[in-house]
Amino acid sequence: MVLSPRLLLCRLPVPEVSIGNKVMKPYKTVNSRKVFKDEGIGKFGEMMIKMLPEELAFTVFIPSEKSFERDLRLRVNDSLLAEKRNDTYAVVSRILGFSAMPRTLSSDTVSSSKEVIYDSLSGFTLYISKDAAGMLVVNRIRSERVDVRRGEIVVHIMDGVIMDADFEQSVQPDDNEED
Protein backbone atom coordinates (compact mmCIF):
# COMPACT_ATOMS: atom_id res chain seq x y z
CA MET A 1 0.00 0.00 0.00
CA VAL A 2 1.37 3.40 -1.01
CA LEU A 3 0.38 6.43 1.05
CA SER A 4 0.45 9.90 -0.39
CA PRO A 5 2.84 12.41 1.25
CA ARG A 6 -0.18 14.37 2.51
CA LEU A 7 -1.55 11.31 4.31
CA LEU A 8 1.86 10.58 5.80
CA LEU A 9 2.20 14.16 7.01
CA CYS A 10 -1.22 14.07 8.67
CA ARG A 11 -0.46 10.83 10.51
CA LEU A 12 2.85 11.79 12.10
CA PRO A 13 2.74 12.14 15.88
CA VAL A 14 3.28 15.65 17.22
CA PRO A 15 6.09 15.77 19.79
CA GLU A 16 5.93 17.72 23.02
CA VAL A 17 7.64 21.10 22.70
CA SER A 18 9.47 22.68 25.59
CA ILE A 19 8.91 26.41 26.11
CA GLY A 20 10.98 27.75 28.99
CA ASN A 21 10.04 25.74 32.03
CA LYS A 22 6.67 24.66 30.59
CA VAL A 23 5.88 21.80 28.28
CA MET A 24 3.36 22.40 25.54
CA LYS A 25 1.45 19.21 24.84
CA PRO A 26 -0.28 18.44 21.57
CA TYR A 27 -3.62 20.17 21.50
CA LYS A 28 -6.93 19.15 20.07
CA THR A 29 -7.98 20.92 16.92
CA VAL A 30 -11.53 22.18 16.84
CA ASN A 31 -13.19 21.58 13.50
CA SER A 32 -14.10 25.15 12.64
CA ARG A 33 -14.44 25.04 8.88
CA LYS A 34 -17.55 27.22 8.63
CA VAL A 35 -16.85 30.45 6.82
CA PHE A 36 -19.11 33.37 7.54
CA LYS A 37 -19.80 35.96 4.85
CA ASP A 38 -19.35 38.85 7.27
CA GLU A 39 -15.70 37.91 7.76
CA GLY A 40 -14.95 38.73 4.12
CA ILE A 41 -13.42 35.38 3.18
CA GLY A 42 -15.90 34.66 0.38
CA LYS A 43 -16.66 31.52 -1.59
CA PHE A 44 -13.25 31.20 -3.27
CA GLY A 45 -11.49 31.80 0.04
CA GLU A 46 -13.63 29.06 1.55
CA MET A 47 -12.49 26.74 -1.27
CA MET A 48 -8.85 27.55 -0.45
CA ILE A 49 -9.28 26.82 3.26
CA LYS A 50 -10.98 23.49 2.55
CA MET A 51 -7.95 22.40 0.48
CA LEU A 52 -5.71 22.52 3.57
CA PRO A 53 -5.52 19.83 6.26
CA GLU A 54 -7.45 21.18 9.21
CA GLU A 55 -5.18 19.82 11.93
CA LEU A 56 -2.00 21.56 10.75
CA ALA A 57 -0.98 25.20 11.21
CA PHE A 58 -1.03 27.41 8.11
CA THR A 59 -1.17 31.08 7.24
CA VAL A 60 -3.10 31.93 4.08
CA PHE A 61 -3.18 35.30 2.33
CA ILE A 62 -6.58 35.00 0.63
CA PRO A 63 -7.59 37.46 -2.07
CA SER A 64 -10.82 39.31 -1.35
CA GLU A 65 -13.84 38.34 -3.43
CA LYS A 66 -13.38 41.65 -5.30
CA SER A 67 -9.73 40.73 -6.03
CA PHE A 68 -10.70 37.32 -7.40
CA GLU A 69 -13.05 39.04 -9.81
CA ARG A 70 -10.80 42.00 -10.72
CA ASP A 71 -7.48 40.15 -11.05
CA LEU A 72 -8.48 36.58 -12.01
CA ARG A 73 -11.88 37.16 -13.67
CA LEU A 74 -13.47 34.63 -11.29
CA ARG A 75 -17.08 35.43 -10.46
CA VAL A 76 -19.02 33.40 -7.90
CA ASN A 77 -22.21 33.26 -9.99
CA ASP A 78 -20.35 32.18 -13.13
CA SER A 79 -17.07 30.42 -12.23
CA LEU A 80 -18.67 27.78 -10.00
CA LEU A 81 -21.06 26.49 -12.65
CA ALA A 82 -20.57 22.81 -13.52
CA GLU A 83 -18.85 23.45 -16.86
CA LYS A 84 -16.30 25.87 -15.31
CA ARG A 85 -15.83 24.30 -11.86
CA ASN A 86 -12.70 22.26 -12.73
CA ASP A 87 -10.92 25.26 -14.27
CA THR A 88 -11.89 27.42 -11.29
CA TYR A 89 -10.64 24.78 -8.85
CA ALA A 90 -7.32 24.60 -10.73
CA VAL A 91 -6.83 28.39 -10.56
CA VAL A 92 -7.82 28.60 -6.89
CA SER A 93 -5.51 25.71 -5.93
CA ARG A 94 -2.63 27.36 -7.81
CA ILE A 95 -3.26 30.62 -5.93
CA LEU A 96 -3.25 28.63 -2.68
CA GLY A 97 0.25 27.38 -3.50
CA PHE A 98 1.49 30.96 -3.90
CA SER A 99 -0.29 32.41 -0.89
CA ALA A 100 -0.16 29.80 1.90
CA MET A 101 2.72 28.96 4.18
CA PRO A 102 3.04 26.06 6.62
CA ARG A 103 3.18 28.09 9.82
CA THR A 104 1.03 30.59 11.65
CA LEU A 105 1.82 34.26 11.28
CA SER A 106 -0.42 36.77 13.00
CA SER A 107 -0.09 40.48 12.34
CA ASP A 108 1.16 40.97 15.92
CA THR A 109 4.31 38.96 15.18
CA VAL A 110 5.38 41.19 12.28
CA SER A 111 7.36 44.24 13.31
CA SER A 112 6.43 47.52 11.66
CA SER A 113 10.12 48.30 11.14
CA LYS A 114 11.26 45.03 9.59
CA GLU A 115 10.36 42.87 6.60
CA VAL A 116 10.17 39.09 7.09
CA ILE A 117 10.64 36.57 4.33
CA TYR A 118 9.03 33.12 4.07
CA ASP A 119 8.49 30.58 1.32
CA SER A 120 4.95 29.65 0.32
CA LEU A 121 3.83 26.05 -0.20
CA SER A 122 4.94 26.24 -3.84
CA GLY A 123 8.33 27.75 -2.93
CA PHE A 124 7.31 31.26 -4.00
CA THR A 125 9.02 33.90 -1.84
CA LEU A 126 6.70 36.00 0.34
CA TYR A 127 8.01 39.39 1.48
CA ILE A 128 5.88 40.41 4.46
CA SER A 129 5.86 43.78 6.21
CA LYS A 130 3.44 45.97 8.13
CA ASP A 131 2.32 49.43 7.02
CA ALA A 132 1.77 52.48 9.24
CA ALA A 133 -1.88 51.50 9.83
CA GLY A 134 -0.84 48.06 11.12
CA MET A 135 -2.02 46.13 8.06
CA LEU A 136 0.14 43.44 6.52
CA VAL A 137 1.67 43.97 3.09
CA VAL A 138 2.74 40.85 1.18
CA ASN A 139 4.68 41.26 -2.07
CA ARG A 140 3.31 44.84 -2.31
CA ILE A 141 -0.31 43.72 -1.80
CA ARG A 142 -2.02 45.25 1.24
CA SER A 143 -4.32 43.32 3.51
CA GLU A 144 -7.93 44.38 4.02
CA ARG A 145 -8.43 42.28 7.14
CA VAL A 146 -5.96 40.38 9.29
CA ASP A 147 -5.90 37.54 11.82
CA VAL A 148 -9.11 35.69 10.96
CA ARG A 149 -8.83 32.28 12.64
CA ARG A 150 -10.11 29.01 11.20
CA GLY A 151 -8.96 26.39 13.69
CA GLU A 152 -5.19 26.18 13.22
CA ILE A 153 -5.29 28.34 10.09
CA VAL A 154 -4.63 32.10 10.21
CA VAL A 155 -6.27 33.97 7.33
CA HIS A 156 -5.43 37.43 6.08
CA ILE A 157 -7.77 38.93 3.43
CA MET A 158 -5.79 40.71 0.74
CA ASP A 159 -6.64 43.49 -1.73
CA GLY A 160 -5.02 41.61 -4.59
CA VAL A 161 -3.76 38.19 -5.60
CA ILE A 162 -0.33 36.86 -4.67
CA MET A 163 1.12 35.03 -7.69
CA ASP A 164 4.29 34.77 -9.73
CA ALA A 165 4.79 36.70 -12.98
CA ASP A 166 4.27 33.66 -15.24
CA PHE A 167 0.92 32.79 -13.68
CA GLU A 168 -0.12 36.44 -13.65
CA GLN A 169 0.56 36.64 -17.38
CA SER A 170 -1.41 33.45 -18.02
CA VAL A 171 -4.56 34.81 -16.34
CA GLN A 172 -4.47 38.25 -17.98
CA PRO A 173 -7.32 38.79 -20.44
CA ASP A 174 -6.60 38.92 -24.16
CA ASP A 175 -6.48 42.43 -25.66
CA ASN A 176 -9.58 41.72 -27.73
CA GLU A 177 -11.53 40.20 -24.81
CA GLU A 178 -14.32 42.32 -23.35
CA ASP A 179 -15.09 42.52 -19.61
Image (spheres, rainbow, N blue to C red):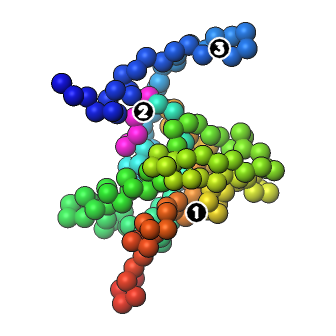
Query: In 3D space, how far apart are the residues under numbered discs 2 and 1 (Cα atoms)?
Result: 25 Å
Residue tagged 1: 159
Is residue 45 visible to the viewer in this orientation of the structure? no
**Extent of the magenta region:** 50-55
Residues 30 and 49: in front is 49
**Does 147 lie within the magenta span?**
no
Task: For marks 2 and 3, give the one nearer the viewer.
Answer: 3
Residue tagged 2: 54
Q: Do the numbered discs 2 and 1 sit on residues whose CB atoms are within 8 Å?
A: no
Report the predominant secondary structure element of the magenta stretch: loop
How far from the left and from the top, in percent, is residue 13?
A: 43, 17
Residue tagged 3: 18
| Secondary structure category for the residue under label 1 | loop
Q: Amino acid at mark 3?
A: Ser
How many neighbours does mark 2 have within 10 angstroms: few (below 14), some (14-19), or many (20 or more)? Answer: some
Image quadrant where one finds the C terminus:
bottom left
Residues 149 and 10: in front is 10
The image quarter in which residue 25 lies: top right
Query: In 3D space, how far apart are the residues under numbered discs 1 and 3 (Cα atoms)?
Result: 38 Å
How far from the left and from the top, in percent, is residue 144?
A: 62, 57
Q: Amino acid at mark 1?
A: Asp
| Secondary structure category for the residue under label 3 | strand
| Secondary structure category for the residue under label 2 | loop
Residue sitting at 45 percent across and 49 percent down?
122
Q: Amino acid at mark 2?
A: Glu
Residues 5 and 36: in front is 5
Residue sitting at 49 percent across and 63 percent down?
164
Precedes in sequence: disc 1 or disc 3: 3
Query: In 3D space, how far apart are the residues under numbered discs 2 and 3 (Cα atoms)?
Result: 24 Å
Residue sitting at 31 percent across and 68 percent down?
78
Task: Give above or below for 50 relative to 18.
Answer: below
Tell me, for residue 172, which label it has, or none: none
